Amino acid sequence: MTPVISKEELSEYLAEVFPQVWSQFEIMEMDGRHTVMKLKVNDRHIRPGGTVSGPAMFGLADVSAYVATLAVVGRKALAVTTNCSIDFMRKPEAGKDLIAHAELLKHGKALTVTDVRLRSEGSEELVARASLTYSVPPVKS
Amino acid sequence: MTPVISKEELSEYLAEVFPQVWSQFEIMEMDGRHTVMKLKVNDRHIRPGGTVSGPAMFGLADVSAYVATLAVVGRKALAVTTNCSIDFMRKPEAGKDLIAHAELLKHGKALTVTDVRLRSEGSEELVARASLTYSVPPVKS
Amino acid sequence: MTPVISKEELSEYLAEVFPQVWSQFEIMEMDGRHTVMKLKVNDRHIRPGGTVSGPAMFGLADVSAYVATLAVVGRKALAVTTNCSIDFMRKPEAGKDLIAHAELLKHGKALTVTDVRLRSEGSEELVARASLTYSVPPVKS
Amino acid sequence: MTPVISKEELSEYLAEVFPQVWSQFEIMEMDGRHTVMKLKVNDRHIRPGGTVSGPAMFGLADVSAYVATLAVVGRKALAVTTNCSIDFMRKPEAGKDLIAHAELLKHGKALTVTDVRLRSEGSEELVARASLTYSVPPVKS
């Protein structure tokens, strides 16, 4: 699968559509199959003990699957998450950004399925894994 | 199952442990089996179009399962989410708080399983459903 | 939601389409929202210790969500499971049939979401819970 | 992670413990992290149209995660599935065996998490993906 949009165009689009939250994220790599995203961890994401909160990890997994989906379907505000299953496996390291590796497993007519693995930056250990389904309504032309 | 802690004590404890986020939540009802929670929706939870964000919905489901778990195991900072499966079914209504009905399905020695259903306040329609597993390490006495 | 097909018609249809497996199942109740199904447990479903196997429980959950879906969309061989999340909570009782209570949570244009709870016949205790998404391609008329 | 038991010993053990079903399966490869399993598809697994049934795919994913778990914890009949999330993505090819690639993502004190990907033999296309949690009660010595 070849991306139908560049990393730069997609970043610009998302900054426009999600002005409140996009600045936390960065698309590091993106082809039609693999996407690497960063969550720039700040105080808002932190829980007692310095660990990144569950909702922040969920949010990173969700936005990574969204980017992986838009990479192949183009800018469609209508792509929506219908299902997510997430396993939390280890505590993220305190004071580190979180890196997501997303792999687009299915690009169907009506939905995409993406596998996402989260790690603390610079670490090999998995912090969490998630799989997400996005519903992608066919565009009427 | 009878709760081993009162709604008031638990609220106080959570306000202490999660000073940054607890003020968004309210325990409306809580017995040993059913827990009703509210997310007081504010600008921070909102996405374009007035809808509540996915991470905010995940956060409400997660905290509801946490409260349902603490209700039967008592204050144990060590209860951690190990798995969540969530289905997003309808858009929340703009300008409404979100209500979670949590039902503790299993209270085992090492883990709890909770089913959570989310609705916009005053509505019958399901916005999302989730099931969450909490790992509850045995307390050494 | 009102069922668009009767319990008897649907049973007949499923016996035709799944001749190898349908005889294990029975639709006990079915309206547009709630469906009750039975798995008539036999040697083929049993594991050492007399417990019903995981695949047999998955199969019952899956067929229950299928029946709950067909009840509102009619006979469409094209409804297919796209996702299942299942929590196994207690061992089924040896020598008992399994009963599934399915609740249709969403009946959308492209998919249905069903919650299923499994118990040993005559018991209150949950053996497992599952949520299943069926993709229901629009019928071309 | 190094396996604590050989492929041959584990196969022998499983043939003993699951005499009814083990003959359908074969451990093709097994180290402490990756496990490759085959489901020898027969009439019992087939649905109209020649496709492998959902329960048969679930069963293969489940047994693959079980083998991946036993590879690192040794023979413990007590390892039980607590959760499975599975996405069905494409129809398996008619007349082909199913191959599962399992990756052990977490080997914790109380549970393991395994990712499993299913393909028809000889094909690159994913048929399904699953993640499974096994509860592994600590052995009393």
Image (spheres, coloured by chain):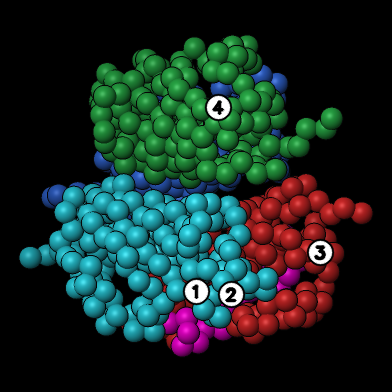
Chain colours: A green, B blue, C red, D cyan
Which tag is nearer the camera, tag 1 or tag 3?
1
Residue in the image at 33% along x and 31% along y:
A119
Find out whether the residues at labels 4 and 1 contact each other: C-beta distance under 8 Å: no
Marks 4 and 1, how far apart in space? 37 Å
- What residue type is disc 2 on? Ile
Residue in the image at 52% along x and 83% along y:
C41
Residue A118 placed where, x, y %? 37, 33
Up-down relation of residue C2 to residue A110 (above or below): below
Marks 4 and 3, how far apart in space? 36 Å
Find out whether the residues at labels 2 and 1 contact each other: C-beta distance under 8 Å: yes
Mark 1 surroundings within 10 Å by alpha-carbon count, few (fewer than 14), some (14 through 19), many (20 or more) = some
Residue that badge 2 annotates: D46
Marks 4 and 2, how far apart in space? 37 Å
The front one of C63 and A9 is A9
Q: Is residue A123 visible?
A: yes
Pick out the residue farthest to the left: D141
Mark 2 surroundings within 10 Å by alpha-carbon count, few (fewer than 14), some (14 through 19), many (20 or more) = some
Q: Quadrant of residue B77?
A: top left
Secondary structure under tag 4 reads helix
Checking the image for residue D41, the label placed there is 1
Q: Is residue C87 visible?
A: no
Which tag is nearer the camera, tag 4 or tag 2?
2
- What residue type is disc 1 on? Val
Residue D98 placed where, x, y %? 47, 65
- What residue type is disc 3 on? Gly
- What residue type is disc 4 on? Val
The answer to whether tags 4 and 3 share a subunit is no
Residue that badge 4 annotates: A67
Residue that badge 3 annotates: C74
